[in-house]
Amino acid sequence: MAEEDAGHEAEHEHVRVAVIGSGFGGLGAAVRLRREGVTDFVVLERAGSVGGTWRDNSYPGCACDVPSHLYSFSFAPNPDWPRAFSGQEHIRAYLEHVTDLFGLRPHLRLNSEVKKMTWDGSRLAWVIETSSGTLLADLVVSATGPLSDPKVPDVPGLDTFPGKVFHSARWDHDYDLRGKRVAMVGTGASAIQIVPAIQPDVSRLTLFQRTPPWVMPRVDRAIGDAERAVHRALPFTTRLRRGLLWGMRELQVQAFTKHPGELGAVEALAKRNMHRAVKDPALRAKLTPDYRIGCKRILLSSAYYPALTRPNVDVVASGLSEVRGSTVVGADGSTAEVDAIVFGTGFHVTDMPIADRVVGADGRTLAEAWADSGMRALRGASAAGFPNWMTIIGPNTGLGNSSMILMIESQLSYMADYVRQLGVLGGRVALDARPAAVDAWNDRVQQRMLRTVWNTGGCSSWYLDANGRNTTIWPGTTSEFRRATRRVDLAEYEVLRSPGSTSASTSSSTSDSTSTSDSTSTSDSIGDINSTVEVDA
């Protein structure tokens, strides 16, 4: 039997770690692995280049709504950001730079879409089937991200539309919108950037708004040569700038998580922002949300409201309900003739497509394991029944007011300690999150979620799954999450060994394992922490 296993294993490449995806999470994982001395890893990417969502989203006006100096790795500061809020092309160039700076290209497997990942308990390894072949990995780090697979609603008659149809994340740059009648479906973060970018060029723009967003001004500006020169000459100024940006957002968290009523003042500012640009009372009524600001992500734009007041723009205060030939029909019965339909309708966030491709120890897919309970993972990383499988930007690791790079770097620290613990245990070994530990973590997160604005603000957002559970957002500060993911607590895992495996250290009882961990209990580690302000670096 051992000879058969060895022969089968020899058929495929076997790596220590397989990273899935090459966006911020995947590239960050690759850098951290190299810094930990791990070089036997590959980065599997379905596309032909790195960049993740910043490669896929290249629509007109695409930019980040987090300041550039905070939306970048602490270990790879960029003194040359051209703007306070840089555009997609600059963020993608930054990720290409990180790839070269840390020598990641030899590890890249481009055009290698993961079709299926199956846990092989006899070998304690993952069998990964990709579009370019099959390989084995001792550990899988899934960094596919929540904004990777576009969601297009099932609109009756859409398949018979004679014009052009595409999603904002799959922009067709070969199709010229100039002079066309365009329907924009959705009013999320992408749509409020697209609308002012294309409005001057199209003959008519019909915006289907199911729910109006709260929009604040985007205080963007160019960063001059002198300012960038200072950052290059004095690197501490870049760190200081990042720290100030981080600290301001950290101080805002309690309003979102504990005292949503305090957001009323911000709401008043958002209304004044709208009133300055929109003078028509009827249009203002359409654009005024009926839920607490912050319940959905607060959007930033200084051009969105002015664009909606232009004579070639119509706002339909309802969703798109039907397509009849070249006629689009709103839920309110309004109609418009259009040449193109652009969907800005978001992504599969709470039903990640990758979950259908991961088969765990009991033969169930991750999607099946989460079908009843919703997405849940220990410290946002490990799902019970899926040994040596970790996710970056996993369940309840999203943010509503700050930079996701902060959360990614915390999860990278957890991943690094996970790798260290496997090394300490020695031999062919795997860690499987204990169901009780996953439940304890998830129950505490959901308990804290009850009073947050995301659950009490009166909106229906993409943060919530089909059953109304918030499986997306982290209900605390980034400092709290950083503390909770600083170390792996082996007491929260079952240690799995292949038959006959030996190691220099024993398969120590999990009751003693806290000597190598943070020794912080699940409940305490996400409780109310009186964190001191510190730069997440």
Image (cartoon, rainbow, N blue to C red):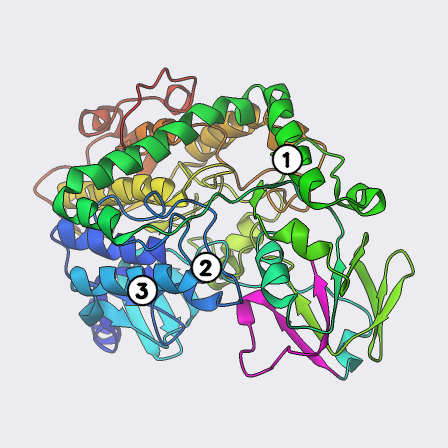
- Relative to residue 172, is residue 135 drawn left or right? left
- Relative to residue 268, is residue 505 drawn left or right? left
Q: What element carries label 2?
A: strand
- Estimate the spatial distance between the alpha carbons at disc 1 and disc 2, rounded to whole Å: 46 Å
Query: Where residue 505 sits in the image (x, y, percent)?
Result: 11, 38
Is residue 177 covered in magenta?
yes
Neighbor class of circle 1 (other Cα within 10 Å; few <14, some 14-19, many 20+) is: some
User: Is 307 or 188 nearer to us in this picture?
Assistant: 307
Q: What element carries label 3?
A: helix
Question: So how many labels did they put on this image?
Answer: 3
Q: Name the residue under label 3.
A: 93
Q: Name the residue under label 2.
A: 359
- Estimate the spatial distance between the alpha carbons at disc 2 and disc 3, rounded to whole Å: 35 Å
Nearer the observer: mark 2 or 3; the answer is 3
Is residue 333 covered in magenta?
no
Q: Magenta region: which residues? A: 163-187
Q: Name the residue under label 1.
A: 270
Question: Amino acid type of disc 3?
Answer: Ala
Question: Amino acid type of disc 2?
Answer: Val
Quarter of the picture containing the C terminus is top left
Can residue 135 be seen by looking at this rendering? yes
Outermost residue toward the right in this view: 333
Neighbor class of circle 2 (other Cα within 10 Å; few <14, some 14-19, many 20+) is: many
